[in-house]
Image: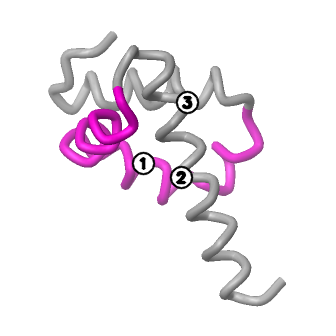
Amino acid sequence: MDINQEIKDKIAYLIAVISEFASAHSLTNAQAYRYLDRFNGLDFINRFYNVEHTLPFEDVVEDLTAYCHRKGGALV
């Protein structure tokens, strides 16, 4: 797989994760993006993409929720 395809796959995954996170917490996609950005959830997904993308979205949302909560987020 070339580097451009890897980047496209990662971007598509990030979009899907943001959408799933939004649904799980009754947020709009924009609200979920801002929350994940503010509490370093996007960085978490970027750093641990190789593991996280192999998990069900429910587990990823749980991981993100816990991580952002440890970083000061109010969602639990």
Answer above or below: position of 47 versus 61. below
Determine whether, in the image, residue 36 is placed left or right of residue 50: left
Contact, CB < 8 Å: mark 1 with mark 2?
no
**Residue 72 horizontal/vertical position (percent):** 15, 27
Query: Does the magenta-highlighted stretch encompass residue 46?
Result: yes
Amino acid type for the residue under numbered disc 1: Phe
In the rendered structure, which segment of residues is drawn in magenta?
28-55
Q: Nearer the viewer, residue 66 or 56?
A: 56
> Does dot 1 land on a helix, a strand or a loop?
helix
**Residue tagged by mark 1?**
44
- Where does the C terminus fall, quadrant-wise? top left
Against 6, residue 72 (above or below) is: above
Query: In the figure, is residue 23 to the left or right of 13?
Result: left
Q: Is residue 63 above or below residue 4?
A: above
Say which residue label 2 marks: 14
Q: Which mark is residue 20?
A: 3
